[in-house]
Amino acid sequence: MATTADFRNGLVINYNNELHVITEFQHVKPGKGPAFVRTKMRNIKTGRTLDNTFNAGVKIETARVEQRPHQYLFKDDYGFTFMDNATFEQVVLPEAMVPFADLMKEGQEVGILFHAETEQPLTAELPTTVELVVTYTEPGLKGDTATNTLKPATVETGARIQVPLFVDTDTKIRIKTADYSYVERVK
């Protein structure tokens, strides 16, 4: 058991008999009334985001999870297949359990969360940034760099993101997986 003082991003809790991961939280101490904690939680099974408010000091049941490194192999009719780097065992996860799957390329390292007591895989987590090659984008107009203007681009995995005007086709870029945003060019 934990309290609201133990909240941190990435903490997995058992809420309404389902596992949720805390993505954002904020302790609020209003001038009038008791303190509380505002949270955003993502349901691990469905992927839906839930906003909730907990009173300060409330006891919460936490779940023990382990993140193990895996390598993404391929996608087929059953879902996404990953291989454990240590034991070479393969794990198949359905599409609902793999957020941001369109930023994943074959051979990429990902972390898979396992429920420690049942050894059941919960979800796959990509690194915070990935490096991908732009396969198509419209050419930028010369002299149109005064403002922070973005244009659409397609990367090698098929995902569509917004990039600055100076990015061309065949440029390797770093992308933030949480919101599909452009970070920088990679040399």
Image (cartoon, rainbow, N blue to C red):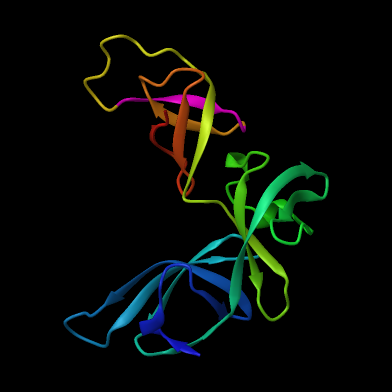
Magenta residues, start to end: 149-157
Q: Is residue 37 above or below residue 91?
A: below
* Residue at x-position 64% and y-position 53%: 98
Horizontal side of 152 relative to 68 (left or right) equals left
Answer whether residue 151 is magenta in the image: yes
Q: Viewer-proximal residue, 141 or 73?
A: 73
Of all residues, the one furthest to the left in this rendering is 31
* Residue at x-position 68% and y-position 47%: 72
Percent position of residue 115, x then y:
66, 74
Q: Is residue 150 above or below residue 42?
A: above
* Residue at x-position 30% and y-position 9%: 142
Percent position of residue 38, x then y:
36, 73
Q: Viewer-proximal residue, 25 or 172?
A: 172
Quarter of the figure that contains the C terminus: top left
Percent position of residue 143, x then y:
25, 11
**Residue 125: which quarter of the image?**
bottom right
Horizontal side of 72 relative to 11 (left or right) equals right
Asked whether the viewer can see residue 46, the reply is no
Q: Viewer-proximal residue, 39 or 142?
A: 142
Magenta part, dominant SS:
strand
Of all residues, the one furthest to the front in this rendering is 86
Of all residues, the one furthest to the right in this rendering is 77
Horizontal side of 52 relative to 33 (left or right) equals right
Q: How many marks?
A: 0
* Residue at x-position 47% and y-position 22%: 171
Q: Is residue 70 above or below residue 74?
A: below
Percent position of residue 39, x then y:
41, 71
**Residue 119: which quarter of the image?**
bottom right
Q: Is residue 112 above or below residue 25?
A: above
Answer whether residue 138 is magenta in the image: no
